[in-house]
Amino acid sequence: MKYPAPYLIDFPCIGEASIGFISVAEYEQQIPFNIQRVFWTYGTPEHVVRGQHAHYETEEVVIAVAGTIEVRTESPEGVKEHFVLKTPGVGLYLPPHYWRSLHYHYGSVQVVLVSTLYKEEDYIRSYDNYEKVYRLKSQ
């Protein structure tokens, strides 16, 4: 089974350098799902790698509202990609079934728009388990 791939989203940017900017994210315009939850991370030390999980159902859009966040993804078929988020005017769509790891540069703040409410059973937290679930399906 082929799953949709992660992709970058450019949010509209309104304003100018002399007064500042605002970016907007709207359902069906930039966000491909109804937002059910929003969370943010901050104060993550540079040596810590966050994420390191996949979801069965949840879709997310990750936005670096401050600093730089590097996101590495892996598809169920084993395709790996690397994204660098460093402006609040760009988000990364993460579909279900993709393994993700996030590395935060000093001072980074992330906001995540999420398609589902939190359910622990939606997470695959072990990479070994992720490989078993998806690699066996693709054979």
Image (cartoon, rainbow, N blue to C red):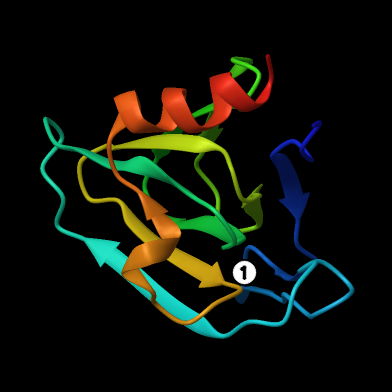
Could you say where residue 35 lies in the image, as x and y percent from the top left? Answer: 63, 82
Residue that badge 1 annotates: 18
Q: Looking at the rendering, which quadrant does residue 74 occupy?
A: top right
**Placement of the N terminus among the 4 image quadrants:** top right
Left or right of 45? Residue 13 is: right
- Seen from the viewer's position, the closer of residues 86 and 135 is 135
Q: Residues within 10 Å of mark 1 (few under 14, many from 20)?
A: few
Left or right of 40? Residue 82 is: right
Could you say where residue 76 lies in the image, as x and y percent from the top left? Answer: 61, 27
Left or right of 107? Residue 110 is: right
- Seen from the viewer's position, the closer of residues 136 and 81 is 136
Residue at 22% over, 50% down: 107
Can residue 82 be seen here? The reply is no
Residue at 79% over, 40% down: 4
| Number of on-image labels | 1
Q: Looking at the rendering, which quadrant does residue 119 occupy?
A: bottom left
Residue at 65% over, 57% down: 89
Could you say where residue 22 lies in the image, as x and y percent from the top left? Answer: 65, 76
Q: Is residue 7 above or below residue 25?
A: above
